[in-house]
Each structure stands twice: as C-alpha cells, then as structure tokens.
Amino acid sequence: MYGFCNLSVVPCRAEASDKSEMTSQLLFGDFFEVLEKEGAWHKIKIDYDGYECWVDEKQYMLISKETYEKLQSAPMVCSNELIQVLSNTSHENIFPVVLGSSMPFISNGEFAVEDNSFALDGDIITGELPYKKEGLVNTALQYLNAPYLWGGKSPLGIDCSGLTQLVYKLNGIKLPRDAWQQAEIGETLSFVEEAEPGDLAFFDNKEGHIVHVGVVMQDNKIIHASGKVRIDSFDHQGIFKSDTNTYSHTLRLLKRIV
C-alpha cells in the first residue's frame, strides 16, 4: 500500500495512538509506503527521508504503486509562502497549505494526483533553480518567530531539525529528519571561524548526544528553534542568549552540507 498526504499538516506518532508522542509531521504532498496496520493506524515510511512513524488512516489518501513511482521521479516543487490557499477542484473545496508543502506535477498552478485535481494560489519554488548558498539563511528567516513544537515542520510550529530540513528542502537539498542524523552527513569544520552562512551547527547534551541544530548566519549569529525560531549569538562554546545572559546550548560540531 502507498499513500499521499492530501491534508495541510498531519501528525506523525511514535505509536499507533492519538495519545502517542508526535515525532514529526506530514505536509501536503508528502508520500509514503505503508509498512503495517494496527486498527485505524498505519505505520508508514516517508519517501522523502525514510522516516518511519504512525498516522491515522483517515488523514491521507491511498495511491497506486504506479502513482507512487511517478511521484518519486517528479521534480521537487514546493509552496513558497508561509500560508497559501489550495483548491481541490475535484471536490470543490479549499484549504490552507504551509511553506514547504510539495506540489507534484504542477504546471500553471494546477496539478492532479490520481482522481484529485488541485489548484494553488501563490508562488512555488523548485530545486532546479541555480543553487545559491545564501538562499539558506533567507529561507530560514521566513520561519522567524514560529513557535517551537516538538515534531513540528510548519511556520505554525516547528522543531530545530524540522527547521533545518525544511530550509534545505526549499533550496533543493535533502536532509534527514532528526538532528543526530543530519550531523552524520557533510564536511566537518574545525573552527567556528570557518563556518559560512548556511552551514549547520550541532549541539549536544551532558551525555554527548546531539540534541539541537541551527543554521549559521553572518557575524557569529545563528538562527534556530528554541522556544521559537530566533536569532542568537554563538561561538566555540555554544549559543549565547542575550535575554538571559547565559549559554543555552553546548557546541558539538559544525557541518558544511553544500
């Protein structure tokens, strides 16, 4: 079985229950393979990043293997505004979609997934555009002041690795879902002074586990999700928050992904 997220934002759970921890989210246009079923809950593997989680069967549409394979080969195209209006012209209804939602097969603002036709009101962005590293910081700034939400991936609530994954996605670059996974790819930098805007900085806890990530900016600044998406200073020790006059996160390593 295969599925396509045809709703705005769908919670992904650690276990097959509404009461279970939300570990991530599906945005409109995400597609996946169904691995197993438990009542009304389906364990899925998201095609984009291989992330496995549980979703309610009522919160997505089933698609054929043929459609799934077509989606795999389709160019990555994303919505490029914080909130946009998407019309399901097949069922004559509208709903919002958030920044970073995928718009497969779109042409002149319209596309179809099996028997469902859609029309998007607003801008799109494609990873096929000439890549510019400075675009990563500009993209991150679109999420500024979004509230922190564990497992979140939207401007209405986002976590640290959700922010970095979406920032890179909107620039045509795939990252894994979690911070510790993101820390395993790219080129390791030796000094803070080597970091360029758009590089990633990772931070650990007392046990040495990677627990936080942010996007490096100019002038020893970092944009990251902590309480909200915010800009703070950082150095070889970690992130320094001027409002509390303390270090909030301990720097573990710096990575250049591109």
Image: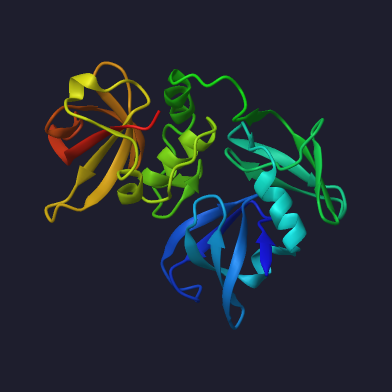
- Name above or below for residue 114 compared with residue 36: above
Query: Quick one: which residue is furthest to the bottom in this view?
Result: 39
- Name above or below for residue 170 compared with residue 67: above
Name the residue at 30% across, 50% down. Answer: 180
Q: How is the image coloured?
A: rainbow
Query: Quick one: which residue is furthest to the top in this view?
Result: 219
Q: Is residue 41 left or right of residue 229?
A: right
Displayed quadrant of residue 133: top left
> Which quadrant of the rendered structure holds the C terminus?
top left
Measuring from the top left, give residue 37's x and y in whole percent: 58, 79
- Name above or below for residue 38 compared with residue 219: below
Q: Is residue 216 left or right of residue 13?
A: left
Measuring from the top left, give residue 28's x and y in whole percent: 64, 50
Measuring from the top left, give residue 142's x and y in whole percent: 49, 29
Q: Is residue 182 left or right of residue 11?
A: left
Task: Report the number of discs.
Answer: 0
Of the pair 241 and 29, the residue shown nearer to us: 29
Displayed quadrant of residue 216: top left
Displayed quadrant of residue 111: top right
> Which quadrant of the rendered structure holds the N terminus?
bottom right
Name the residue at 70% across, 42% down. Answer: 74
Measuring from the top left, give residue 54's x and y in whole percent: 52, 69
Name the residue at 39% across, 54% down. Answer: 150
